[in-house]
Image: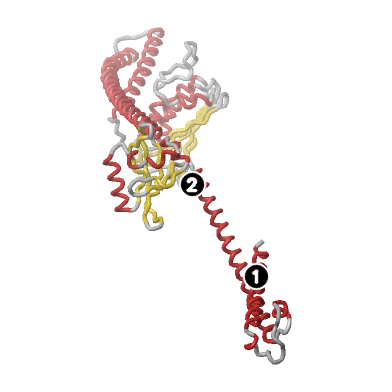
Amino acid sequence: MSILYGAGVIGALNLGFWVADALWRFTNPAHLPTASIYPPPTSWTQALFQNIPPYTWFMRALWLGLTLLGGILCERLWSWQNRRARAGRASEQHYRALFENAPVSLCVTTQDGRLLEYNAGLRQLQGFADTEVAQINVWNWYANPADRKQLLAQLQDEGYTHRYETKLNRVDGAGYEASVTSTLIPLGDQEVILTVLEDNTEANRLKNKLLNERSTLARQVEEHTAALLRTNAELTQALRVKDEFLAIMSHELRTPLTIMMTLADNLYQEIYGPLSERQRAQLRSIQESGYNLLSLINDLVDLAKIGAGQLKLQHTPFTVRQVCELALQAVRAQAQKKTICLSLEIDPTVEVMVADAGRIRQMLTKLLHNAIKFTPAGGQAGLEVRGDADQAGVHFVVWDTGIGIPPEKISQLFQSFNQLDTSSTRDHDGTGIGLALVERLTHLHEGVVSVRSHPGEGSRFTISLPWRKP
């Protein structure tokens, strides 16, 4: 269509030139340069198409070219302006659609509060109709005039406000908690305010609820912590009282027991007169029971001292073989009664170490005693000592071919007063404090005790101690 307009313009201009030229020649025949050659025209037709001198055709061709070029330029300019206008309208529609359908409440206002632009989110939030816009002043929405003044002052000073917390009123008077984000932007010859409104009523309710729950939880944690501290203090006091009780009772029991065992030894040695075999057998039973009871009392005393932090180790250099042989000697009679074969194997590199020799012999004796107790008659048990130069440690291993320990019960072995077989018909006696004492004495030596065992395949208890050399 634009090409047709251009062609029309060209044709009109060219025709106008022809008419003007013919009119001038018709009215001024005397002034024609070719008047002597061509007779003056006598009609419009003759003036237009006859007796035309060469310069006239040149001027007409020149004018035709100029008008053609002018028409093309006009058509291009008109097309460019149309495309620009269409692009502007499309861009305006695009941004208008974005503004209108934005998921937040947007408005553009003057600095005195008149509403210039707004979207559907603002209409829905504030509850007004399009017909009411002329009567709306956004500054009247602020429930607190001081907030309005402070927000406007901040806008004037900094040019923007970010999530300003305030309370707004809707058109119907209902209030809500809102955050206001505004910025000044130039528009024509004035600065307007672009504002984003957010309804924070539900968010603040959830926030306050969370803060209250957090405060309640913190208070409960403090109460539970205080209760745990009280309980811990009570347990500490109870343990201290228990340890003191055990220490006192162990001392009170050990003193008369020692007197009884001394008297039994004197009687057995026939210091007070001859005894029959039956009397000697009864005295042996009394002596064995007394020694077992004394061992139990000593173990209780040691546990009580360890629990109270009063047991001190005596670190001295000692010969490893000598301590091991003394431990085996202490249980040899017990092994002979059950025809159990005892063995001793010591790494030749392990000769001397620094530790509490008495406590190590005590630990080995208890492990050997357990090995013999839980090994059937005719079985085997033994003690192995291995040195680990790389780790600077010594491993004392007590092994047996006894009944073994179920895997699920190994974790209970080192608990005080714990017996794996708690039935009234159990085959092996004991109080369950021997292994607990071994484990605590090992820790005092900065070592660890471990066990490997399977039912019916025996057990291996390993005491790993630091190898300190003199």
Instruction: Report whether residue 337 is seen.
Output: yes
Q: What is the number of callouts on the image?
A: 2
Circle 2: residue type: Phe
Name the residue at the bottom extreme.
36
Question: In the image, which disc is placed on residue 152?
Answer: none
Give the class, few, some or many, for how many residues have Cα within 10 Å of label 2's Cα (few <14, many ≥20): some
Circle 1: residue type: Ala
Task: Examine the rendered structure and indicate whether residue 149 appears above or below residue 373.
Answer: below
Give the class, few, some or many, for how many residues have Cα within 10 Å of label 1's Cα (few <14, many ≥20): few
Q: Residue at x 70, y 81 (%)?
A: 42
Q: Which residue is mark 1?
A: 12
Instruction: Report whether residue 359 is seen.
Output: no
Side of 131 where 401 appears, left or right:
right
Quarter-of-image position of residue 9 = bottom right
Is 193 or 19 nearer to us in this picture?
19
Is 64 or 35 nearer to us in this picture?
35
Is 91 or 421 nearer to us in this picture?
91
Q: x and y percent of residue 288 in the render? A: 39, 16
Secondary structure beneath label 1: helix
Side of 459 where 158 appears, left or right:
left
Side of 1 where 411 appears, left or right:
left
**What coloring was used for the rendering?**
secondary structure
Is 131 or 109 nearer to us in this picture?
131
Question: In the image, which disc is placed on residue 99?
Answer: 2
Q: x and y percent of residue 280 in the render? A: 38, 11
Quarter-of-image position of residue 234 = top left
Q: Earlier in the sequence, mark 1 or mark 2?
A: 1
Task: Measure how far apart labels 1 and 2 are at the Cα level.
Answer: 48 Å
Q: If the image is split into quadrants, where does the C terminus sit?
A: top left
Secondary structure beneath label 2: helix
Q: x and y percent of residue 118 in the render? A: 44, 44
